[in-house]
Amino acid sequence: MTWSPPLREELRGVEPYGAPQLDVPVQLNTNENPYGPPAEVVAEIATRVAQAAGRLNRYPDRDFTALRSALRDYLAAESGVRVAVEQVWAANGSNEVMLHLLQAFGGPGRVAMSFAPTYSMYPEYARDTHTAWVEGHRHDDFSFDLDHAAALIAEHRPSVVLLPSPNNPTGTALPHDVVGQVAALVGDGVLVIDEAYAEFRRTGTPSALELLADHPNLVITRTMSKAFAAAGLRLGYLAADPRVCDALRVVRLPYHLSSTTQATALAALAHAPVLLGRVDQLRKERDALVRWLRERDFAVADSDANFVLFGRFDNRRAVWEQLLDHGVLIREVGPAGWLRVSIGTPDEMEAFKDALTKVGRQ
């Protein structure tokens, strides 16, 4: 008798999530910070991890109080909004933060919702928590369609609405009035504003943290993977009403943040100004790339993130493959006919421009 594992029916034939990881000279497909941590930060991390290693026989602080306090202080410095320690939560990447939210507030008989184009992992969080998934749409220019959202929310009464701002894959940020109105529409549900790329937002683009005190159903998620140049750390976090954080304590796995993760994150936060020192440069590179693409008559979405969505191509797959042939890896993602490129070093951006010039529009 041939045995096969009793896989859930909805998982049969599903490919695991993941962007291509290819060994090419220019990797601009996963929105990483191209600049690694400087030597003094690496040394601080090594020191703190070594100290934590001496107590690996003991479980870590399961409520990671010191880390929550340091994250609270960072958010206050970055956004001007100071929350209580009890309003901060963290997990292994913003992916696990989102999963905690769907475990606590989704589930059978409940609905999670977003508006396309949007982050492709959201429906997977819903699937993994047996939460029904409903996806609306945005305007053609990727701005938020509030009338459409109001109708869809009224029809489905979602318990969780997920809105990235800046949006992935378009880079589009949400204005305060949209966030406030959607929070009101969601009512007893939870509105999650995913600010994974918030540090890259343009001057004058606010953070939804400013609205937290007025909307108890609002949750703002962040990550250290992007601006902090710490994708390998896997540390995501959120700010929300303390009752939200208390609910997440129920669904998290015991001791879910290891001692070494907490030590590394604390070291990184202690050096936040240094690690964020390249953000302004990356913003300038992004804005320069937007101008360059538009001068060549590409369609380009306005971006407040560290990537640019551009098009439109009759055969984007062919363009992606030919860029790869020139040693440049970008991302085939988002609406049909569009491609996304992460912002890299000046040399990497020149390599991308040169390759795209040679490949053309197809």
Image: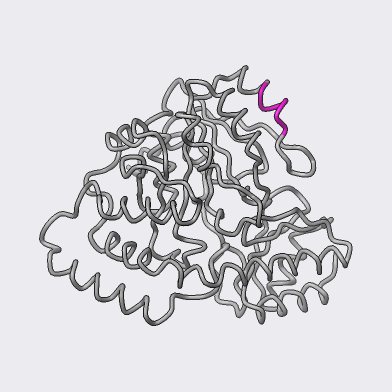
Q: Is residue 181 left or right of residue 234?
A: right
- Image quarter (top left, top right, bottom left or bottom right) of the N terminus: top left
Residue 268 coordinates in the image, percent (x, y): 37, 67
Q: Is residue 37 left or right of residue 147?
A: left
The one nearer the camera, 16 or 8, is: 16
15 falls in the magenta region:
no
The residue that appears at 42% across and 46% down in the rendered structure is 82
146 falls in the magenta region:
yes
Q: Main secondary structure of the magenta part?
A: helix
Q: Is residue 137 left or right of residue 101?
A: right
Residue 197 sits in quarter: bottom right
The residue that appears at 58% across and 46% down in the rendered structure is 120
326 relative to 138, above or below: below
The one nearer the camera, 332 or 138, is: 138
The one nearer the camera, 315 or 289, is: 289
The residue that appears at 34% across and 62% down in the rendered structure is 265
Question: In this picture, which residue range is highlighted in magenta?
Answer: 145-150
Residue 176 coordinates in the image, percent (x, y): 63, 38
- Image quarter (top left, top right, bottom left or bottom right) of the C terminus: bottom right
